[in-house]
Image (spheres, helix red, strand yellow):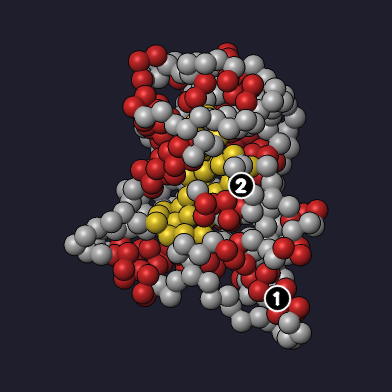
């Protein structure tokens, strides 16, 4: 496991689609080299990692491929060089930017130190609520709801019906929520969550869509009443 | 948002951010449990993971290895404090060598140390 990365990295053979639906940068470079008639390993892509996001998307000719279409839900993960570098602050900023642009935003923190006293999902959720109280986001476009969901550890690791090998991808992509969850789940009153968090988090989503707090049913209506609720 | 859209290849989709804990090579969830309130299911899973190491997370897994199967494009938050250039570059290389697609390196602005300028130059990014 620790060294299997070293084999395919740089060989140009990593043709897997990543979770956002696109093949990786090295695979793209290899494909371009192949199309240009060059043999061997493509020279490493020199795209800058800061801000240059174009390399993550395949050329237009490949976009119709079954495995290369973008997924319904764009997913990104946030790593940090160290603890205390402002990861949560910047992640909350990204969540805010998404909400202001009228998106549905899902924030996940599967591993949390110091839980339940310290909860970053609660931080992001309440930051969002505070912000929304002060400035109203743009009116939601048809088919899109303004909502943010913060989910804590216990929701992600919920007890499965049947034991399966631990597969985070399956957990994240195949998870469905009951259609009534955004009506039935309420956050703790007064900006802090109640003391029975553990019992609550086991059974219930840790928080409620930010935009749906005042208007119950907004999210379900906004997604066209599809059975997967706010996702 | 436009940058995320370009990366994803589709506009106005739902965004998901998965935030990791600690640094890039911080340990993931270990097999040892500190919660005594673990239910019977958790105890069974714990026994399961200890008796036969199949499918579950082995103790001592780094988070960079733990999240690798998700294959998510990654945003790295750099360290803007003293000594942050080294840790940022080290974690960037840790991500690269595991095959992550690092879309962006974000840092808090430290006007005195200006780590972001150094990372931009020295990191070859």
For the residue carrying disc 1, how many other residues have a C-alpha within 10 Å: few (<14), some (14-19), or many (20+)?
A: some
Q: Is residue B8 visible?
A: yes
Which element is circle 2 on? loop
Residue B16, percent from left and from top: 55, 41
Q: Is residue A171 left or right of residue A195?
A: right
Comparing labels 1 and 2, the label whose residue is closer to the camera:
2
Residue at image coords 48%, 18%: A213
Q: Quadrant of residue A124?
A: top left
Judge if badges 1 and 2 mark residues of a common chain: no
Residue at image coords 45%, 71%: B125
Check the residue under mark 1 and report the chain it is in: A
Residue at image coords 63%, 75%: A10
Residue A48, percent from left and from top: 49, 70
What is the distance, in whole Å, between disc 1 and disc 2 at their CAs? 25 Å
Query: How many numbered tags mark residues here?
Result: 2
Q: Report the quarter where the C terminus of chain A lies.
A: top right
Q: Quadrant of residue A157?
A: top right
Residue at image coords 71%, 36%: A174
Check the residue under mark 2 and report the chain it is in: B
Which element is circle 1 on? helix
Q: Is residue B49 left or right of residue A67?
A: left
Residue A86, percent from left and from top: 34, 48
Q: Which residue is mark 2?
A: B11
Q: Is residue A201 visible?
A: no
Question: Which disc, if any, is residue B2?
Answer: none
For the residue carrying disc 2, how many other residues have a C-alpha within 10 Å: few (<14), some (14-19), or many (20+)?
A: some
Q: Is residue A150 left or right of residue B56?
A: left
Q: Which residue is mark 1?
A: A32
């Amino acid at each position: 496991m620790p060294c299997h990365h070293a084999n395919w990295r740089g060989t140009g053979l990593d043709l897997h689609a990543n979770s956002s639906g696109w093949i990786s940068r090295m695979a793209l470079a290899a494909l371009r080299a192949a199309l240009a008639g060059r043999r061997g390993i493509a020279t490493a892509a020199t795209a800058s990692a800061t801000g240059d996001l174009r390399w993550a998307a395949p050329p237009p000719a490949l976009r119709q491929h079954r495995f290369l279409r973008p997924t319904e839900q764009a997913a990104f993960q946030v790593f940090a060089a160290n603890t205390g570098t402002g990861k949560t602050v910047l992640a909350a900023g990204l969540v805010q930017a998404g909400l202001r642009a009228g998106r549905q935003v899902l924030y996940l923190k599967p591993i949390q130190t110091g839980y339940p006293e310290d909860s970053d999902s609660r931080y992001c959720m309440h930051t969002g609520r505070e912000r929304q109280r002060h400035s109203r986001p743009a009116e939601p476009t048809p088919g899109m709801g303004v909502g943010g969901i913060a989910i804590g550890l216990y929701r992600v690791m919920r007890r499965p019906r049947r034991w399966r090998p631990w597969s985070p991808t399956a957990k994240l992509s195949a998870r469905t929520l009951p259609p009534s969850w955004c009506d039935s789940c309420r956050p703790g009153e007064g900006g802090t969550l109640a003391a029975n968090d553990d019992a609550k988090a086991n059974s219930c989503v840790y928080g409620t869509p930010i935009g749906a707090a005042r208007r119950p049913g907004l999210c379900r209506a906004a997604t066209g009443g599809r059975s997967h609720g706010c996702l | 948002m436009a940058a995320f859209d370009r990366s994803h290849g589709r506009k106005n989709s739902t965004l998901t951010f998965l935030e990791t804990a600690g640094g890039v090579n911080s340990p993931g969830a270990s097999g040892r449990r500190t919660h005594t309130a673990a239910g019977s299911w958790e105890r069974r899973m714990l026994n399961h993971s200890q008796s036969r190491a199949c499918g579950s997370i082995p103790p001592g897994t780094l988070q960079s290895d733990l999240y690798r199967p998700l294959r998510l494009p990654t945003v790295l938050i750099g360290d803007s404090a003293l000594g942050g250039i080294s840790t940022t570059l080290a974690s960037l290389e840790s991500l690269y060598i595991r095959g992550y697609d690092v879309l962006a390196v974000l840092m808090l602005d430290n006007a005195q140390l200006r780590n972001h300028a150094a990372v931009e130059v020295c990191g070859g990014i």
